[in-house]
Image: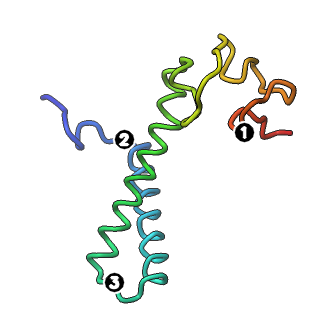
């Protein structure tokens, strides 16, 4: 038997992601309803779906893909321009030390 589609590829982690994004969709709907009380349920649903899809796309493009690929072009902060790349990272060092920071994206959040 060939297991394909949702039934064949479903697992606990996927169920968890479905639950998290469903709850996020509902929270977005609640926030939109408070902000736009005249919108219909369909308008709220559609806009919340769009916002949630954009959130998923951002997570995929900005966080997940660079972590999986881990190459300099994939880990470059969005909108960064210029500068030579070193093998250690976009800031010219491995830790983003304060002495070599030329862009806000390279700042070490621990400092």
Q: Nearer the viewer, residue 14 or 29?
A: 29
Between the C-alphas of marks 2 and 1, the distance is: 39 Å
107 left or right of 105 in image? right
Residue at image position (45%, 52%) is 55
| Mark in front: 2 vs 3 | 3
Residue 99 is situated, as x and y percent measured from the top left of the image, at 87, 26
Q: Residues within 10 Å of mark 3 (few under 14, many from 20)?
A: few
As drawn, the residue found furthest toward the front would be 82
Among numbered discs 2 and 1, the one appearing first in the sequence: 2
Residue 18 is situated, as x and y percent measured from the top left of the image, at 39, 53
As drawn, the residue found furthest toward the top would be 87
Among numbered discs 3 and 1, the one appearing first in the sequence: 3
Residue at image position (23%, 43%) is 7
43 left or right of 30 in image? left
Mark drawn on residue 8: none
Which element type, helix, strand or loop, lies under badge 2? Answer: loop
Which element type, helix, strand or loop, lies under badge 3? Answer: loop
- If the image is split into quadrants, where does the C terminus sit? top right
Mark drawn on residue 39: 3
Residue at image position (56%, 18%) is 72
110 left or right of 39 in image? right
| Mark in front: 2 vs 1 | 1
As drawn, the residue found furthest toward the bottom would be 38
Residue 10 is situated, as x and y percent measured from the top left of the image, at 31, 42
Q: Name above or below for residue 3 compared with residue 25.
A: above
Residue located beneath label 1 in the image: 104
- If the image is split into quadrants, where does the N terminus sit? top left
Between the C-alphas of marks 3 and 1, the distance is: 39 Å
The quadrant in which residue 52 appears is bottom left
Residue located beneath label 2 in the image: 11
Q: Nearer the viewer, residue 5 or 45?
A: 45
């Amino acid at each position: 038997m060939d297991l394909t589609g949702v039934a064949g590829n479903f697992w606990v982690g996927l169920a968890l992601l479905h639950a998290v994004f469903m709850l996020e969709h509902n929270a977005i709907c609640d926030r939109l309803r408070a902000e736009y009380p005249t919108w219909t349920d369909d308008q709220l649903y559609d806009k919340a779906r769009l916002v949630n899809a954009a959130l998923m796309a951002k997570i995929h493009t900005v966080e997940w893909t660079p972590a999986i690929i881990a190459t300099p072009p994939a880990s470059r902060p969005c909108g960064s321009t210029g500068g030579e790349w070193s093998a250690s990272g976009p800031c010219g060092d491995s830790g983003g030390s304060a002495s070599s920071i030329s862009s806000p994206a390279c700042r070490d959040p621990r400092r």
